[in-house]
Amino acid sequence: MGDFAQKIVKLQKDKLLKILNEAYAEEWLAYYQYWIGAKIAKGIARSDIVKEFLEHANEEFKHLGWLADRIIQLGSTPLIDVTQFQEYAKCKYLLPINEDTKSLVLQNLSAERCAILKYQEICDMCKGQDYITFNLSRKILKEEIEHEQEMEDFLIDFDYYNK
């Protein structure tokens, strides 16, 4: 990003880069959580859930690419040490100790709700201060809300199967 484009950002750049790197780390962890869940899932609606998990994994990967680009545009470097992902992330990777589809859906629902809070925080921080980051975080927020709904829909399906 050019010097002038960086100067129009009306936020403390260090604070903005910190939260963007947190989100970047969280997206890597979310990507892996969905991806590994798709590989190990067993139980009710497995094929539908695996398909959805892989779709979500791809979307989380897309998000982390957008975040990396924005961090670079702001004159910094995204986290390059994978061991820092758990340290930076506020939304943690949840170890899938149970391969049951319902357990995996509940874990991903929890992670999506954390992501929604993160992107709402970034939107609130950037509104009127950094339109590029605001629009990026708003776009990701929309997809995270859709992910939450899809996980909630699976829980409704589980209730139906268990009747």
Image: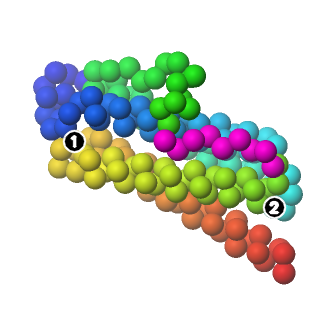
Q: Quadrant of the N terminus?
A: top left
Question: Would you name the residue on which mark 2 appears?
Answer: 45
Task: Tell how many labels.
Answer: 2
Q: CA distance from mark 1 to mark 2?
A: 42 Å
| Residue 117 x/y as whole percent | 43, 54
| Residue 6 x/y as whole percent | 19, 28
Q: Which mark is residue 130?
A: 1
Q: Is residue 127 visible?
A: yes
Residue 95 forms part of the magenta stretch: yes
Residue 59 forms part of the magenta stretch: no
Using the image, determine if residue 57 lies above or below residue 79. below
Q: What's under tag 1, amino acid-wise?
A: Asp
Give the residue displayed 37% in from the left and 37% down from the top.
19
| Residues marked 1 and 2 touching at CB (< 8 Å) | no
| Residue 154 x/y as whole percent | 70, 65
Viewer-nearest residue: 118 or 37? 118
* Chief SS of the magenta region: loop
The quarter holding residue 54 reads top right
Give the residue displayed 63% in from the left and 66% down from the top.
152
- 10 Å crowding of disc 2: few (<14), some (14-19), many (20+): some
The quarter holding residue 11 reads top left
Magenta span of residues = 90-98
Please identify the residue farthest to the bottom as the structure is shown.
163
| Residue 16 x/y as whole percent | 29, 35
- Answer left or right for 19 relative to 60: left
Give the residue displayed 16% in from the left and 21% down from the top.
3
